[in-house]
Structures are given as C-alpha cells and as structure tokens.
Image (tube, helix red, strand yellow):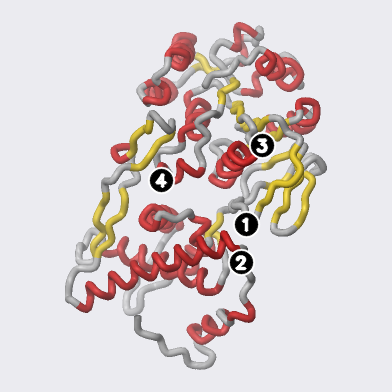
Amino acid sequence: MAKKSTKKGSPAGAMKATTNPAKRKPLRRGEKAAREKTAERLVKIADKVIAAGKKKQDPFLDIPTRALSNVRFNEQRKIIEMGDNKQRRAFFNLGQAKKFMQTMLVAAGCKELADQVKTTSIRDLFYHCKHTIEGTRENTFDDQSESDPIIEDLEVTLASLREELGLFADPKGSMVGPMTIVDGGDEINLSRMGTGGWAVPSIVEDHVIQFRQCKAKFVLLIEKAAVWRRFSEDRFWEQHKCMIIHGGGQPPRGVRRLIYRMHSELKLPVYVLVDNDPWGYYIYSVVKQGSINLAFESQRMAVPAARFIGMSSYDAEEFDVPPAVTIKLTDQDIRRAKEIMVYPWFDKRPWQREIKNMLKQGVKLELEALSAKDFSFITETYLPTKIRGKRWLD
C-alpha cells in the first residue's frame, strides 16, 4: 500500500506521532492476538480493493446477509446461526457506491485504532469518519444510524467481535452479588457496590474482566433497572446467594457476553425474569438462543440452558394479582405473539401453551404489577416460590 506524506504539523504527522511504540499501552496476550488478527483482515480488505483498482476492475465486498432469511436454528447446539448468503457491495454500482465508501472509511478508522492500540466508542468513530467530501456538499455520514450497521457488517465480514475492532458502546446494565472480580486491573467486591451496583462495561472479555472468588449459586437476569433495584435494595442476592444483573430492557452485548462467561466458566445456572408479554418472551429467547440480527455471535453469547422463570401468563390467577393492574394486549402485541409462536425455539408444548394462554386472556403483565400485592412481594414471595418449586420454562 502506498505511504502518505506526513509533513510536520499535519494531521497525518500527528497521527504518526501518536503511534510511537513507546507510548502504546501494553495488551494482554489474548487481546493482542485478537486485535492483530482483526487488523490483518482489515489490511486484506484494503489490499483487495487496491488490487481491483489497479486491474481497472470494480472493487467490491461480499458481506454476509444479516436477516431472518439467512439464519437457521441449530437443533443440536440450540442456538441461532448465520447462513452462507451474502450481498455484494460494489463501488461502481451507483446505488451502493456511498455505502461502499462508508464501509471503507469505518474499516480505515478501525485500522487506525489497532495501529494506535486504542479503543473508542461507536459514537466517537462516527465523528472520526464524518466529513464533507472535498468539492461537494455531500457528507460521508449524516447520522450515526448510518455508521452503526456498517460496524456490524464489518464484524460479520471479518468474523470479529466489535470489541476486537477496538469499539465499545456506552455501559448499560448493573450487577451485584457475592463475587469478586478484577476490572482493568482493579479488584472489585461486587457485594459492596451500594444501591447502583457495578456498571457492566461494553467490553467484558477476559483480558479486561477476570473472575475471582465467587459464592453465587446462580445468575438472575432482570429485565428492568427499576425492578432490579428492588431486588438489590431487598438484598435478594445476599439471601439467595446469586448474582443479579439487568440490561435496561433488551440486554446489550456486554451484559449478554458477561452472562455467557459466568455460565460457561463458573458453571452458574441462568434464570431470566421479564414482563409477561411478547417482548419479554423475545428478550428471553435472545439470551437463550441468540438474536437474528447478531446470529454470527450466538456461539459466544447465547446460553441454551437459560431458564424462563417469569412472568407467566398463569401468574395473575395463581398469585391473585388484581385484574386492575393487567394491561390489554394491543394489536401489535398480538401480531408479535403470533410471530414468535412459529419460531422453532418456541415450538415446544409448554411454550405454545404459555403463549396461547396469554392470547386467550387478552392481557399482559408487567413485573411491577406484583407491587399491587406489596412492594417486596416479588422478592419475598413470588420469585422464592418459583425457585423452590422449580417452576420455570426451558
């Protein structure tokens, strides 16, 4: 690849100065290998484009299709996997030229991060790649909604995690419980994190987070931060010896990856506590089988042994929840419920019975509805009853 001129004081010169090996932060062995392998793949993409240009051919990238049509459920492994279908993104195609250029810009930004041994946020990368094309009024990117999907395109094309590209998202999720970890070299006792808990970072790989002493017997993923706070305040984790974690709704990749690690490395069972609605069911399925959009990462995130512990469509009657706190299903809820019923991972008699009963009742229940009984009913009665009776769905 041709070298760029780096005059003193120029942006390129400044970039060169920051890559001084003496100033680089040392990497752990696992992280170094992953980052180097990803950087090599990025260079291969660039070399392929340059080679096509020299031959006066149309440069292109073949990117795996991230859609329901290109995923399958592996019955043996019990996870969603990506298929082999690909979409060609060509530079000489007027409908694809801008996206091709954007892909190369994002790839170049990730290569810079690798060269400088740095990480940055996906928001920061968006601004790094955004500028007005010289001689035009056209911006390379107008909104982050354009760059985020391209990051995922690069992930599947390179077979690398976003974190291996040097990118992270804002922390989303908290955890507390009887375990000690090392986070970036600092030892942290997760049983002494106050009311807010430990903020789960975007990058939770073993070169950043190491598990130390663990007295937990299981992991409880709670859908909502507000409900998680009730469990934290009531010190449910202390009484039942468990790790409680939330992801603020649909758990982000950092939370899912951390749960996967606690399950696979510490052999902790995983229980999922979500609202009784189609969206809660789907959150559970993402934890258990993986997501359709990120099927290429299922093997490093999905926990097929995860158990759905609530809420169930039968809970209102069983726990005498007042009818006034139920919510009528919307047309969108009904459509979504019927969609997930045909997913192969929900094609089991207990799950078909569960979803059909919700549709028959015509209502949904939020976790907070149990507060109609008592503020701590969910921690003192509801969940302990379910755990003792082993009343969960697989």
Mark 1 neighbour density, 10 Å: few (under 14) some (14–19) many (20 or more): some
- Write the residue at 67% across / 30% down: 218
Q: Which residue bears the numbered disc 2?
A: 27
* Up-down relation of residue 10 to residue 280 (above or below): below
Q: Amino acid at mark 2?
A: Leu
Q: Which residue bears the numbered disc 3?
A: 245
Q: Position of residue 133 (x, y in %)?
A: 36, 74
Total number of numbered discs in the rendering: 4
* Up-down relation of residue 335 to residue 165 (above or below): above
Foreground tag (4 vs 1): 1
* Up-down relation of residue 339 to residue 209 (above or below): above
* Label of residue 296 in the image: 4
- In which image quadrant can residue 387 be found? top right
Q: CA distance from mark 4 to mark 2?
A: 26 Å
Q: Amino acid at mark 1?
A: His
Q: Amino acid at mark 4?
A: Phe
Asked whether disc 1 touches disc 2, contact meaning CB atoms under 8 Å apart, the reply is: yes
